[in-house]
Amino acid sequence: MLIQNKIIQSVRDKCIADEFVSACMMYGSFTKGEGDQYSDVEFYIFIEDDKMEKFSSRHWVSEVYPIHLIFYNEYGTEVVIFSNMIRGEFHFLPVSKIEIIKSFKPTGLFPDPESMYIYDSTEQLKPLLDDLGGAGPDRMTDENVNFAFNNFVNAWLMGVNVMRRGELARSLEALTLVQRYILQLIRVKENTVERCISTESYKDYVSITSKLKENEIKLAYKNALNIVEALNEMLGSLYKVDVDKDLISKLYSYLNE
């Protein structure tokens, strides 16, 4: 049995035994049948409203499984590093906010809401999870394609500017954003959200990676324009796109100034 499954069972047992806990749901790879020995464990745990003030999330999690570290990340999520180097993410909320689950639907596809169920004493959790089932959001839209193209331009220009200033580390950091938006566009082109991209697209992606050397970083930004130019030509005939050939041409000129 995977250690993650033992942690999940420990969370379930603790929820059942703890009168402070009203409901608990899991999300992430283990709810999609994709969990392995490298996967995180992720939970929303709903606490009785009048018990929130007395509730100690740090103490609660430490009783689930031995931990090395627990902290809040930049999104306000409580992140746990267990003693076996498995990561956990925990959201502790008052039960009066359980309908936050309705807001999850636009974020992705939930093929098996039943696997998200951990514990419930409210009789509210299962109906909310059932509503998450069915088709996920349509990501192949003008809005999403424009979002990726527009943010690519923003990240690309920021990265090139700091490179020209000599801030190579910041330029390399910005390149990760460039890669993110190109990957989104590749997924639109290949009509895939979860599956691996094609071998050809992987080769393109490799061309926009770099070591911390100015000539390699500059080449990666040039290759990024090449890829986006091709994607713009292909996707521009299918979606309403703000970024046009003239803008891409100006970016080429700007890189070579």
Image (spheres, rainbow, N blue to C red):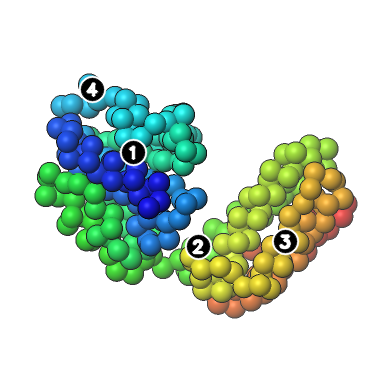
The residue indicated by pointer 1 is: 91
Residue 241 seen anywhere in this rendered image of the structure: no
The circle on residue 223 is none
Please name whichever residue, 231 or 25, is drawn nearer the observer in this view of the structure: 25
Mark 3 and mark 1 lie on one chain; the one further toward the N terminus is 1
Tag 4 secondary structure: helix
Q: What amino acid is found at the position of numbered circle 3 in the picture?
A: Val
Q: Which mark is first along the chain, 3 or 2?
A: 2
Q: Which residue is mark 3?
A: 206
Instruction: Identify the residue under disc 4.
Output: 53
Q: Residue furthest front?
A: 1
For the residues marked 2 and 3, what is the alpha-carbon distance in whole angstroms? 24 Å
| Alpha carbon distance from label 2 to label 4 | 40 Å
Of the residues tagged 2 and 4, which is closer to the observer? 4
Q: Are marks 2 and 1 in contact (CB under 8 Å)?
A: no
The three-letter amino acid code for the residue at tag 1 is His
Would you call the spot at circle 4 few (<14 residues within 10 Å), some (14-19), or many (20 or more)? few
Residue under pointer 2: 144
